[in-house]
Image (cartoon, helix red, strand yellow):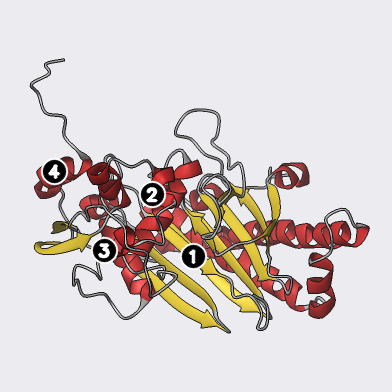
Amino acid sequence: MDENIKKLSDSDVTAHTAALWKYAPIPDSPEPYPEYRSFYKNDNGTEIIAARVRGKKHKHEGTNCDDWYEFDTVGNWTVCVVSDGAGSKRLSRIGARISSEAACAYIKEQLSALDRSQTESLLAMPFDKAEFTAVCTKLAEIMRSGFDAAYSAVEGAALIRSEDEIFTSDLGRKCEVKDLSATLLASAVIPLENGETFVISVAVGDGMIAAVNANGEFSSALKLLGNTDKGGFSGETEFLDETKTAEKLYSNTKIMRGKVTSVMMMTDGVSDDHYPNSPELLRLWLDLMLNGIIDFPTESYEPEKGEAPEPEAHPWVNDGSVEISLCYTKNILAKNKLSLEELWGKRFGSLMHRSSLEAFGKKLADDKSERLKVWLDNYSQRGSFDDRTLVIIEPKIPKGVQ
């Protein structure tokens, strides 16, 4: 390779290719879904920040976003489900929504039937106690049964649409269950009185669930919850279907308890952009802080040396006359010749704060979910064109617990 040839950065590639991306609106098709979906909820101090955006490829081609998410709360529990419809199936977005709604509703209903006080007390017991094992087993059964409820709902949705001439005309044949194929990731999160957080998750297909302890050391701050499926070949994944036996779901059930400040659930449009997920999802967490989606932990910052890179500005895909400014952890690393581990050690210092959108005087949306929507819709990553969904749960530790 000619040493005089400049290697283009991700930012360079984004700038060079921006004009090639076109924007086409949501198509006039059966059950079109909105291009964006974002929600914010503060439930007794537990924050839930969620957004889903249509990817560049779908915008360019004028097709629907195939992602969906649902979340709900019951007592101190937060239930969240994320799904990504199969890109090869025209109606997979419907399967993503139907399965998410059904799983979330079922899990919430079952959790609401438990003796909450007793359950939370048992979850705080030592790991080797039989009572702790028993309550975890019960919760795992609820989560896995939620997947059964999700698939039953998808079967029913496919049957209804198989008798609908609108869908028959769109597909050129009767709708089948496989037309609604989608991945499914679910978690239930609860802060405990001992200052820890309990998380249980089940996953079929790609995407990722991760727990972050912002106060932890670099080597222990991130826990990945689930070895999500990748199918038989590179680039493939698995989808929710009737072959997902109890044994399969059992192996994909993960439980953790520990210090947690954020639980992040995402489709592969986000997780694939942060590979390897460990430790790159810590870079994502820092990016979220830089762009005002996750709060800086303190108003007082340790003074330290280091140069704060200016925000990157690129044209918005939807309207090239509008520029969107974002801040990136990767630019701090490059400008200051730091590793991610080194910057994690400085995450509460002045360098991170001086490198944020707010520090550069950029106007932020009042709603954190709107800030997340802007981030997901516009962050640049070479080769990233997919729909993007991210739900962030920041569990509140019960009052009186430090």
Mark 1 packing: few (<14 Cα in 10 Å), some, or many (20+)? many
Residue 343's tag is: 2
- Residue indicated by mark 3: 354
Q: Nearer the viewer, mark 1 or mark 2?
A: 2
Is residue 37 positioned above or below 336 on the image?
Answer: below
Q: How far apart are marks 4 and 2 (CA)?
A: 30 Å
Residue 181, given in percent of the width and then of the height, sits at 52, 49
Q: Is mark 3 on a helix, strand or loop?
A: helix
Q: Is mark 2 on a helix, strand or loop?
A: helix
Residue at the spot 67% in from the left edge and 83% down from the top edge: 400
Mark 4 packing: few (<14 Cα in 10 Å), some, or many (20+)? few
Q: Nearer the viewer, mark 4 or mark 1?
A: 1
Residue 17's tag is: 4
Q: What residue type is labelled 1?
A: Ile
Residue 250, given in percent of the width and then of the height, sits at 75, 46
Name the N-terminal-most of marks 4 and 2.
4
Residue 31's tag is: none
Residue at the spot 79% in from the left edge and 66% down from the top edge: 123
Q: What residue type is labelled 2?
A: Leu
Locate residue 340 relative to residue 2 in the image: left or right: right
Q: Is mark 1 on a helix, strand or loop?
A: strand
Is residue 176 positioned above or below 392 on the image?
Answer: above
Q: How far apart are marks 3 and 2 (CA)?
A: 13 Å
Q: Which of marks 4 and 2 is in front?
A: 2
**Is residue 89 in view from this perspective?**
no
Q: What residue type is labelled 4?
A: Thr
Q: Distance between the residues labelled 3 and 1?
A: 24 Å
Is residue 80 positioned above or below 74 on the image?
Answer: above
Front in this rendered view, residue 166 or 304: 304
- Residue indicated by mark 1: 392
Locate residue 21 relative to residue 145 in the image: left or right: left
Front in this rendered view, residue 239 or 107: 107
